[in-house]
C-alpha cells in the first residue's frame, strides 16, 4: 500500500486498488493483485484509448479500481495545486 505523505482518507481510497511492493515490479505502483502498473492506464488514456480499451487488454482489473484510481489522482492533483498556490 502507498504510505508516505498520504492522509488517512487517501489511504482508505486506495486500499485494495493500488499496491506498491518491492517484490512486484520493483515497487512500481500496480493495480492490486496484478503486475499491471497504474502508469499503463495513464499511457492508454494519453494516447486516446478508452477505459474500455484498457480493460479489454487487462481483464483482471476491475472497472471500479480504474475509477477509484482516477478519482484519487484527481484529488491529489487538486491538493497539490492548492498547496502550490499558497
Image (tube, rainbow, N blue to C red):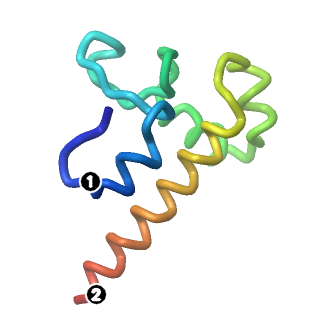
Relative to 3, does residue 73 appear above or below in the rendering? below
Mark 2 secondary-structure assignment: loop
Relative to 10, does residue 36 appear above or below in the rendering? above
Q: Is residue 45 left or right of residue 2?
A: right
Q: Crowdedness of circle 2 by 10 Å Cα count: few (<14), some, many (20+)?
A: few
- Using the image as rendered, state which of residue 17 and residue 83 is in the foreground: 17
The x, y position of residue 58, in whole percent, is: 68, 20
Q: Which residue is mark 2?
A: 85
The x, y position of residue 11, in whole percent, is: 35, 47
Instruction: Give the residue at x 46% y 65%.
Output: 75
Mark 1 or mark 2: whose residue is earlier in sequence: 1
Q: Which mark is residue 58?
A: none
Q: Is residue 23 left or right of residue 32?
A: left
Instruction: Give the residue at x 47% y 15%.
Output: 35
Q: Is residue 43 left or right of residue 37?
A: right
Q: Which mark is residue 6?
A: 1
Q: Crowdedness of circle 1 by 10 Å Cα count: few (<14), some, many (20+)?
A: few
Instruction: Give the residue at x 36% y 76%.
Output: 81
Amino acid at each position: 500500500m502507498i504510505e508516505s505523505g498520504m492522509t488517512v482518507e487517501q489511504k482508505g481510497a486506495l486500499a485494495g486498488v493500488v499496491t506498491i511492493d518491492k517484490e512486484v515490479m520493483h515497487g512500481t505502483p500496480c493495480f492490486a493483485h496484478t503486475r499491471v502498473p497504474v502508469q499503463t492506464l495513464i499511457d492508454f488514456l494519453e494516447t486516446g484509448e478508452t477505459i474500455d480499451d484498457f480493460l479489454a487488454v487487462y481483464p483482471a482489473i476491475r472497472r471500479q479500481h480504474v475509477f477509484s484510481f482516477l478519482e484519487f489522482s484527481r484529488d491529489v492533483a487538486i491538493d497539490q495545486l492548492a498547496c502550490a498556490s499558497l
